[in-house]
Image (cartoon, grey):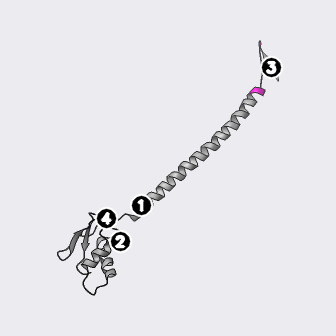
Amino acid sequence: MVNTVSTYTYTERKQGMARRKATNKRGYKMRAGHIAKFTTVVAFFFILFIGFMIMKGNATTVVPEAPTASEQVIVVGSGDTLWAIASEAKDSGEDIREVIYSIKQRNGLRESGLHAGQSLIIPADH
Protein backbone atom coordinates (compact mmCIF):
# COMPACT_ATOMS: atom_id res chain seq x y z
CA MET A 1 0.00 0.00 0.00
CA VAL A 2 1.40 3.34 -0.98
CA ASN A 3 0.51 6.45 0.96
CA THR A 4 1.40 9.95 0.03
CA VAL A 5 2.04 12.42 2.76
CA SER A 6 3.00 15.79 1.52
CA THR A 7 5.60 15.18 -1.13
CA TYR A 8 7.08 12.11 0.60
CA THR A 9 5.99 8.67 -0.62
CA TYR A 10 6.74 5.45 1.23
CA THR A 11 5.64 1.85 1.28
CA GLU A 12 4.08 1.22 4.64
CA ARG A 13 4.51 -2.36 5.89
CA LYS A 14 6.21 -4.59 3.38
CA GLN A 15 9.83 -3.73 4.21
CA GLY A 16 9.13 -3.46 7.93
CA MET A 17 7.52 -6.92 8.02
CA ALA A 18 10.43 -8.47 6.11
CA ARG A 19 12.92 -7.03 8.56
CA ARG A 20 10.84 -8.07 11.52
CA LYS A 21 10.65 -11.69 10.31
CA ALA A 22 14.42 -11.87 9.77
CA THR A 23 15.00 -10.38 13.20
CA ASN A 24 12.66 -12.91 14.75
CA LYS A 25 14.41 -15.84 13.10
CA ARG A 26 17.85 -14.61 14.07
CA GLY A 27 16.63 -13.68 17.53
CA TYR A 28 15.21 -17.18 18.01
CA LYS A 29 18.52 -18.76 17.00
CA MET A 30 20.35 -16.49 19.39
CA ARG A 31 17.96 -17.41 22.19
CA ALA A 32 18.47 -21.12 21.53
CA GLY A 33 22.24 -20.59 21.69
CA HIS A 34 21.89 -18.70 24.96
CA ILE A 35 19.82 -21.52 26.44
CA ALA A 36 22.48 -24.06 25.45
CA LYS A 37 25.26 -21.93 26.96
CA PHE A 38 23.26 -21.35 30.15
CA THR A 39 22.54 -25.07 30.50
CA THR A 40 26.22 -25.89 30.02
CA VAL A 41 27.31 -23.36 32.65
CA VAL A 42 24.70 -24.58 35.14
CA ALA A 43 25.76 -28.22 34.57
CA PHE A 44 29.43 -27.28 35.07
CA PHE A 45 28.77 -25.52 38.37
CA PHE A 46 26.49 -28.34 39.53
CA ILE A 47 29.26 -30.89 38.91
CA LEU A 48 31.76 -28.60 40.63
CA PHE A 49 29.44 -28.24 43.63
CA ILE A 50 28.96 -32.01 43.89
CA GLY A 51 32.75 -32.48 43.76
CA PHE A 52 33.27 -30.05 46.63
CA MET A 53 30.55 -31.74 48.66
CA ILE A 54 32.21 -35.13 48.17
CA MET A 55 35.58 -33.71 49.21
CA LYS A 56 34.03 -32.04 52.25
CA GLY A 57 32.33 -35.29 53.20
CA ASN A 58 35.70 -37.05 53.39
CA ALA A 59 37.35 -34.32 55.43
CA THR A 60 37.77 -34.94 59.13
CA THR A 61 36.61 -32.12 61.36
CA VAL A 62 36.77 -34.04 64.62
CA VAL A 63 39.55 -32.84 66.90
CA PRO A 64 40.50 -35.50 69.43
CA GLU A 65 40.79 -34.62 73.08
CA ALA A 66 44.25 -33.97 74.51
CA PRO A 67 46.16 -37.17 75.31
CA THR A 68 46.22 -38.39 78.87
CA ALA A 69 49.42 -39.35 80.69
CA SER A 70 48.90 -43.04 79.95
CA GLU A 71 48.41 -42.49 76.19
CA GLN A 72 51.24 -42.34 73.69
CA VAL A 73 51.48 -39.73 70.92
CA ILE A 74 53.36 -40.64 67.75
CA VAL A 75 54.10 -38.74 64.55
CA VAL A 76 53.42 -40.66 61.35
CA GLY A 77 56.48 -41.07 59.14
CA SER A 78 56.67 -41.55 55.40
CA GLY A 79 55.43 -45.01 54.46
CA ASP A 80 53.85 -45.74 57.86
CA THR A 81 50.54 -47.55 57.83
CA LEU A 82 47.90 -47.88 60.49
CA TRP A 83 48.41 -51.64 60.42
CA ALA A 84 52.16 -51.30 61.16
CA ILE A 85 51.58 -48.76 63.94
CA ALA A 86 48.89 -50.93 65.51
CA SER A 87 51.09 -54.04 65.32
CA GLU A 88 53.82 -52.22 67.28
CA ALA A 89 51.34 -50.88 69.84
CA LYS A 90 49.35 -54.06 70.48
CA ASP A 91 49.93 -56.41 73.38
CA SER A 92 50.67 -60.07 72.72
CA GLY A 93 47.50 -62.04 72.07
CA GLU A 94 45.49 -58.90 71.23
CA ASP A 95 43.62 -58.75 67.90
CA ILE A 96 45.25 -56.16 65.64
CA ARG A 97 41.89 -55.22 64.09
CA GLU A 98 40.58 -54.16 67.50
CA VAL A 99 43.71 -52.05 68.06
CA ILE A 100 43.26 -50.38 64.67
CA TYR A 101 39.61 -49.71 65.48
CA SER A 102 40.48 -48.14 68.85
CA ILE A 103 43.19 -45.94 67.27
CA LYS A 104 40.74 -44.77 64.60
CA GLN A 105 38.06 -44.06 67.20
CA ARG A 106 40.46 -42.18 69.51
CA ASN A 107 41.76 -39.97 66.68
CA GLY A 108 38.42 -39.44 64.89
CA LEU A 109 39.57 -41.14 61.68
CA ARG A 110 37.02 -42.35 59.15
CA GLU A 111 39.51 -44.12 56.93
CA SER A 112 42.78 -45.96 57.47
CA GLY A 113 44.87 -43.63 55.28
CA LEU A 114 47.62 -41.67 57.05
CA HIS A 115 49.76 -38.70 56.03
CA ALA A 116 53.41 -38.12 56.91
CA GLY A 117 53.65 -35.67 59.80
CA GLN A 118 50.21 -36.53 61.16
CA SER A 119 50.02 -36.97 64.94
CA LEU A 120 48.24 -40.04 66.30
CA ILE A 121 47.22 -40.78 69.86
CA ILE A 122 47.63 -44.43 70.80
CA PRO A 123 45.04 -45.21 73.49
CA ALA A 124 46.26 -46.96 76.63
CA ASP A 125 43.33 -49.37 76.80
CA HIS A 126 43.40 -50.66 73.26
Q: CA distance from mark 4 to mark 1?
A: 17 Å
Q: CA distance from mark 3 to mark 1?
A: 72 Å
Circle 1 — which element? helix
Q: Which residues are magenta?
A: 7-15
Indicate the position of residue 71 as horizontal and vertical percent values.
Answer: 20, 75
Residue drawn at 69 percent across, 34 percent down: 23
**Relative vertical location of residue 18 with respect to residue 108 in this rendering, above or below:** above
Q: CA distance from mark 2 to mark 4?
A: 10 Å
Indicate the position of residue 40 as horizontal and vertical percent values.
Answer: 56, 49
Q: Which residue is mark 3?
A: 3
**Relative vertical location of residue 120 with respect to residue 91 in this rendering, above or below:** above
Q: Which dot marks residue 112?
A: 2
**Mark 3 or mark 2: which comes first in sequence?**
3
Q: Is residue 48 left or right of residue 63?
A: right
Q: Which dot marks residue 55?
A: 1
- Kind of residue sitting beneath label 3: Asn
